[in-house]
Amino acid sequence: MKLAHFSDVHVTRFPLAGGFALKRLAAVASYTLAGRGRHFEGSDERIAKLLAHVDAQQVDHALCTGDLTGVASDEELARAAELFGPRLEQPERHSVIPGNHDRYVDSARGAFERHFARLCEGARFPAVKALPGGVTLVLLDVARPTGLVDSSGLVGEAQRSALLSLLTDASLRQRFVVVALHYGLLRMNGQRDARSHGLRDDVELMHLLDRDDVTVDLVLHGHLHRPFTLRTKRRHVVNAGSATDLHLRCGYNVYDIDPGAHRVGVTRFTWSPGALDYQPDPSHPLNTTLVTR
């Protein structure tokens, strides 16, 4: 079974639409004066190339772990939906969860759901999808609107409780279980993220996922734009990084999953400025094989 995973594509539109908010105004300053906007210049074209390239890999399913937009404006979300096109009508082949930039401010509540709810089981989380070949995908929503200097996420007690019930169900024991969320459990160096940038209940979620009585093979996320893989006490975690950030070696992953052997091969594809397309990157450190149980 082949699963594509990309994240943090950031459709960006300025001047801002979707209602004034001080946090959006601060984002304009960051994107213009601080130069962050150059990272995502022409992102629409890369997103279109990305989606076409994923299709060409003939994957069984494609997962986006959030941050479709820059500031969750109506225009940005509508453009992201336009780029997905008919894929929005294929929940059996595509999944999308929100990132913090898709829930940027209070006035954006419900905007992500209007465009992408069908790809995440009606935006009722945790959402569960049975994929081909014995793979189960569990989607979490950890994004929320926050204050001016806060971009943290939260799983929340209710969602953690529901997740624990799901992952301890005996029906999953013979499945290959993938848990997907926007925020990472740890940074690349194995340390916790800053309180203002990471999950507020990261320790609680990590303890849950590392329990002996839960069934989890792989944890996938984005948010941190540099891709990496690491291991918690018991679980392999893969961050796809940003698929479109020109400041980095941006790209996406394809996982070749063997559910019976609980083995997954990771292949990295990166953006080539010369070819103006995504290409296999055989020298990338993310290319590896993970044994998950």
Image: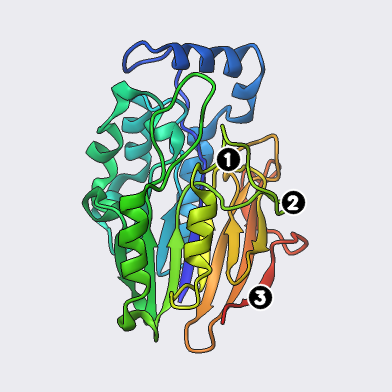
For this view, does 125 lie left or right of residue 268? left
First-in-chain label (2 vs 3)? 2
First-in-chain label (2 vs 1)? 2
Q: Residues within 10 Å of mark 1 (few under 14, many from 20)?
A: many
Using the numbered discs, state the Cα–Cα distance from disc 2 to disc 1 in whole angstroms: 23 Å
Q: Position of residue 40 (x, y in %)?
A: 58, 30
The residue drawn where x is 29% and y is 44% is 116
* Element type at mark 1: loop
Per the rendering, the mark at residue 244 is 1
Tell which tag, 2 or 1, sits nearer the viewer. Answer: 2
* One can see residue 93 in this view: yes
Which quadrant holds the C terminus?
A: bottom right
Which amino acid does the dot numbered 2 rest on?
A: Asn
Which residue is nearer to you in this view: 125 or 203?
Answer: 203
Q: Residues within 10 Å of mark 2 (few under 14, many from 20)?
A: few
Using the numbered discs, state the Cα–Cα distance from disc 1 to disc 3 in whole angstroms: 25 Å
The answer to whether residue 69 is above or below residue 162 is above
User: Which residue is disc 2 drawn over?
Assistant: 189
Tell which tag, 1 or 3, sits nearer the viewer. Answer: 3
Which amino acid does the dot numbered 3 rest on?
A: Thr
User: Which residue is disc 3 drawn over?
Assistant: 289
Quarter of the image holding residue 22? top left
Q: Position of residue 225 (x, y in %)?
A: 62, 42
* Element type at mark 3: strand
Q: Position of residue 206 (x, y in %)?
A: 53, 59
Circles 1 and 3: CB atoms closer than 8 Å: no
The answer to whether residue 21 is above or below residue 209 is above
Using the numbered discs, state the Cα–Cα distance from disc 2 to disc 3 in whole angstroms: 20 Å
